[in-house]
Amino acid sequence: MAVAPTPAERFIQGILPENPVYRQLLGLCPTLAVTNGLKAAMTMAGAVAFVLFCANIVTSMIRHLLKPHLRIVIFTLIIATFVTITDRFLAAYMYDMSKRLGPYIPLIIVNCIIICRCEVCASRQSVFTAGADALGQATGYALALASIASVREILGTGTLFGMQVLPTAWPNWVIMILPPGAFMTLGLLLGAVNWFEQRRSEKANSKRG
Amino acid sequence: MHYLTDIILIALGAALVNNFVLYYFVGICPFIGVSRRIDMAVGMGFAVTFVISIAALLSWTITTFILMPGAPVSKYIAGLFMPAEAAAKVDLTILSYVVYIFAIASSVQFVEMYVRKFYPSLYRSFGVFLPLITTNCAILFACLIIFSQIVGVDNPADAWDLGKSLTLAVFGGIGFTIAITIMAGIREELELCDIPKPLRGAAITLIVASVLAMAFMGFTGVDSGLKKALTPAPVQTEQGAPK
């Protein structure tokens, strides 16, 4: 890229063109694990957004002090600090949700999205750009989690956010809330996103040619 | 006898019933990324098993002696400048995540340096995967399970010892190796198939993983069945007739 994107462009890029889940295939572990209900997925997205934003800001502030061979360790330590804050907060104010998400909150530390954004963006850009980038990526991540979680929750239990949306006669597809359903939903949604992307680029090509 | 039963159940649970990849979804990134060829998949599997064992050893030691409430080392250090009853209550568990990730990252760095220096052939076969493993969720996940089994238990006598922790780690790693090797075998065959274009790459891998996860669901209940078979008879009569 010849011209560095502005903060606003970075924000937009995170939502769809560089969506962390569908485009970059990052952070799949929590994506698969917490999406059996929309509420859990949104809590997770909020936690990731908070950690990503804070970690990006702090990394950006200390970017001139970083030594190349130690930077990954520094990133993970920064992230681990904010994850501890998030974990204690959830345990204090949303105890049931914290129990349900269990080990996946601490596993945010090793979530590739955050380390990748610290490495690619925050360690080279100003604080403002890094913040915008974090918000864009977090929004994209929340959208991806919401799409997977809605499919799984609607098909698996016939509810959305705990409210009945399908007729009660709906035979719950229990497989959708079990591990295989997670892999299946993400695989098919990924295929659908790729298909739309291909059609769009084909259209653009035919217009040009 | 009782201890051996526990070990067998932990091993079976970690390797097959609650497979790290297909049940807990940890270590998905290498599972998708490095499962293109069988030899690479096996190398990755062994590297993960190796690092996970070291991490389990470290996390058990750190948790038992430093982090948990009333741990000997922190009690001694706090006792130097605090009254004894306050020192006995020192609780460092809030630092656990930072400490674990630091232990994992630094131990991976040391292992990589050591292997590169003294075993160049081994380094060539799996050394390239080592830095990637730092950010592998499976390692931290094993540490967190061990943490919850030491700190989270009500009765101090139930806390896991080093043997149980290492069993979990080694067999968790073996379970990861099994899953990633099967996946690589399937993907080598998939190269020859005519897959619809949008599904190529990660999408079809995830769908195959879904079928694999269904297959591994077949192990559900094996551990509880085995537990019933291995538990001595008097315990069963105490519980009464279940059905």
Image: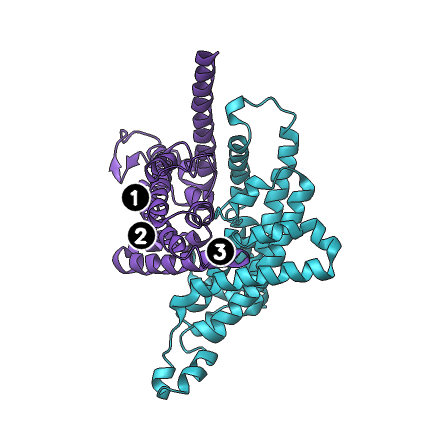
Q: Is residue A193 left or right of residue B195?
A: left
Q: Quadrant of residue B55?
A: bottom right
Give the mark, 1 or 2, whose residue is nearer the N terminus. 1
> Can residue B2 be seen at all in this image of the molecule?
no
Q: Position of residue B87 (x, y in %)?
A: 38, 83
Q: Colour of chain B?
A: cyan
Q: Secondary structure at mark 2?
A: helix
How far is mark 3 from mark 1, CA to CA?
23 Å
The dot on residue A97 is 2
The three-letter code of the residue at mark 1 reads: Lys
> Can residue B171 be seen at all in this image of the molecule?
yes
Q: Secondary structure at mark 3?
A: helix
> Is B38 situated above or below B142?
above
Q: Residue at x 40, y 69 (%)?
A: B93
In-front residue for pair A55/B98: A55
Q: Position of residue A96 (x, y in %)?
A: 30, 54
Q: Residue at x 58, y 67 (%)?
A: B163
> Is B235 situated above or below A72?
below
- Residue under label 3: B141
The three-letter code of the residue at mark 3 reads: Phe
- Residue under label 1: A39
Q: Position of residue B110 (x, y in %)?
A: 61, 63
Residue furthest to the front: A2
Give the purple chain's letter. A
Q: Residues within 10 Å of mark 3 (few under 14, many from 20)?
A: many
The three-letter code of the residue at mark 2 reads: Met
> Is A36 situated above or below B232?
above
Q: Quadrant of residue A13?
A: top left
How did the renderer colour the structure?
A: by chain
